[in-house]
Image: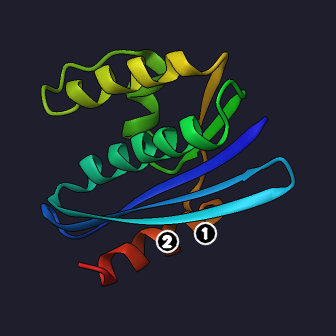
Amino acid sequence: MIEIYTDGATIGNPGLSGAGVFIRGNNQSFEYAFPLGIMSNHEAEFHAVLKALEVCKKLFPGEILSLRSDSKVVVDVLENNFTKNKTFLPFLETFREEVTHFPHVFIKWIPEKQNNHADLLARNALQEL
């Protein structure tokens, strides 16, 4: 199973944003910091998950994924496969499509203190803007 930690960071809301992705799998680890431009904090969190899936599609095709995020909003939308928020709907639709590339994708909410590595990567992405 591939463990993925994602986080978004935003200066202002909306504001300059970045996404951090930390992946552990097959006795290796991978770190990514993605500058995102201007968006809300929730949008940055969704982008982080989608960026992680992009990376995993290339590095770990066909593997079981365990996604972890400290965003309750993102986890609730993706776990429940539902949102009334029109801003979040395109993220949910993309997520639905991307998870078809994997046999199982689990998503779990974790406290911020367990997501320090992804948080640091997301903040590093802000420095690249």
Please state if 57 lies on the left or on the right of 65 as rendered.
Answer: left
Label 1: element kind: helix
As drawn, 125 above or below 58: below
Please state if 98 lies on the left or on the right of 5 as rendered.
Answer: left
Instruction: List x then y, in percent, for residue 37.
Output: 18, 64
In the image, which disc is placed on residue 5? none
Q: Which residue lies at the image location 67% right of the left edge and 37% below the top edge?
A: 60
Please state if 127 lies on the left or on the right of 105 as rendered.
Answer: left
Q: Which residue lies at the image location 26% right of the left edge and 56% below the top edge?
A: 41
Q: Which residue lies at the image location 31% right of the left edge and 77% below the top edge?
A: 126
Q: Answer whether labels 1 and 2 touch (C-beta < 8 Å).
A: yes
- Could you say which is closer to the camera, residue 48 or residue 87? 48
| Mark 2 residue type | Leu
Instruction: List x then y, in percent, for residue 76.
Output: 43, 29
| Mark 1 residue type | His
Q: In which quarter of the image is residue 11?
A: bottom left
The residue to which callout 2 is attached is 121
The residue to which callout 1 is attached is 117
As drawn, 100 above or below 78: above
